[in-house]
Image (cartoon, grey):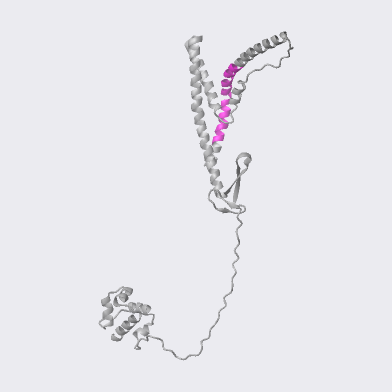
Amino acid sequence: MEDLGNKISEYRKQLDLTQKDLGDKLNVSPQAVSKWENGQAEPDASTIKKLCEIFKISTDELLGNDPPVKEAAVTASPAPVVERVVQPVVERVVEQKIINGYCEDCKKPVGPNEYVVKHTGRGAGVQHIYCKQCNDIRIRSERIYAYNEFKRQNKKSLVLGSLIALGVTALFCVLFMAVIKLEPLWATGLIAVGVFICWLAFGIQVFWEDSVVPDIFFFFLKSFTLPGVIFTLDLDGIIFLILVKVGGAILCAILSVIFFLFGLLFTPIASIVILPFAAIKRALEGRSLKKAAH
């Protein structure tokens, strides 16, 4: 046991370790190391194995009778045979990626068949490059925006169309009750309901895109004009020209007003006929936009 303690002490000192350092490596106290070196106790088999690993020696060297050798003895030996191992040279062929540009959103370099080109600006003269992933995100965002804009336009047309219908109906009621005094009173109310429905159909459709109602309405806003007048360059010819121009202007104004009033009557009635077909078309368009957005 004393020989084992001496060897532990000498190997520890060769590694310039204190008893505390060696105890920390073995997870034991310095007192335990001191007892081993003084021959008062003996480490167990697992601790002896750990000591051999720390001292980098075999178990036989630690437990044998030979004293530890501080330095390896130099003995004559034949010249060592050096075996040269030739490592094969492996050439790595790195294929360089062709870069056609950089994505404007994620700044990632893109090569052939990895990007999409968008043209914007006047005459589509501005070119934008997006990778396919960013382009898909942009397309989805545009579809969601189009669907939200479609819903916003429907809400706007319903609110403003109702305001237009209420305004025209109120004007009609004032006109008929205060001026024309249509009797009986229920007849005025019945006509007012019809006016409200007609102008509600008109007001809703006038704010829809691709609606034909605004085109019908603007058709009746045109004014009439006189054709050219042939006259002579004398007093009678000039008087004739003035009379024709003045009379023709008054006639054109009257015809334009009558035509416009007829349009105010015709356009709302036509709007009721057009509304079911336009509503079906718009519902299908909304369903298509919703499906594309989701």
Residue 271's place in the image compared with 9, above or below, is above
Q: Which residue lies furthest to the top in this view?
A: 236
Q: Which residue lies furthest to the bottom in this view?
A: 76
- Residue drawn at 31 percent across, 82 percent down: 9
- Residue drawn at 62 percent across, 22 percent down: 219
Q: Pinpoint residue 220: horizontal percent, then vertical percent.
A: 61, 20
Horizontal side of residue 53 vs 164, given as left or right: left
Residue 64: name its quadrant: bottom left
Using the rendered image of the protein, determine whether residue 167 is visible from the camera's viewpoint.
yes
Q: How many marks?
A: 0
Viewer-proximal residue, 238 or 91? 238
The quarter of the image holding the N terminus is: bottom left
Q: Pinpoint residue 15: horizontal percent, then vertical percent.
A: 35, 79
Residue 267: name its quadrant: top right
Viewer-proximal residue, 58 or 275? 58
Q: Pinpoint residue 126: horizontal percent, then vertical percent.
A: 61, 43
Using the rendered image of the protein, determine whether residue 182 is visible from the camera's viewpoint.
no
Confirm whether the magenta stretch covers residue 66: no
Segment tinted magenta in the rendering? 259-286
Viewer-proximal residue, 22 or 288? 22
- Residue drawn at 62 percent across, 41 percent down: 124
Principal SS element in the magenta part?
A: helix
Confirm whether the magenta stretch covers residue 270: yes
Residue 120's place in the image compared with 16, above or below, is above
Residue 124's place in the image compared with 87, above or below, is above
Horizontal side of residue 85 vs 240, given as left or right: left
Q: Which residue lies furthest to the front in this view?
A: 234
Q: Pinpoint residue 27: horizontal percent, then vertical percent.
A: 31, 73
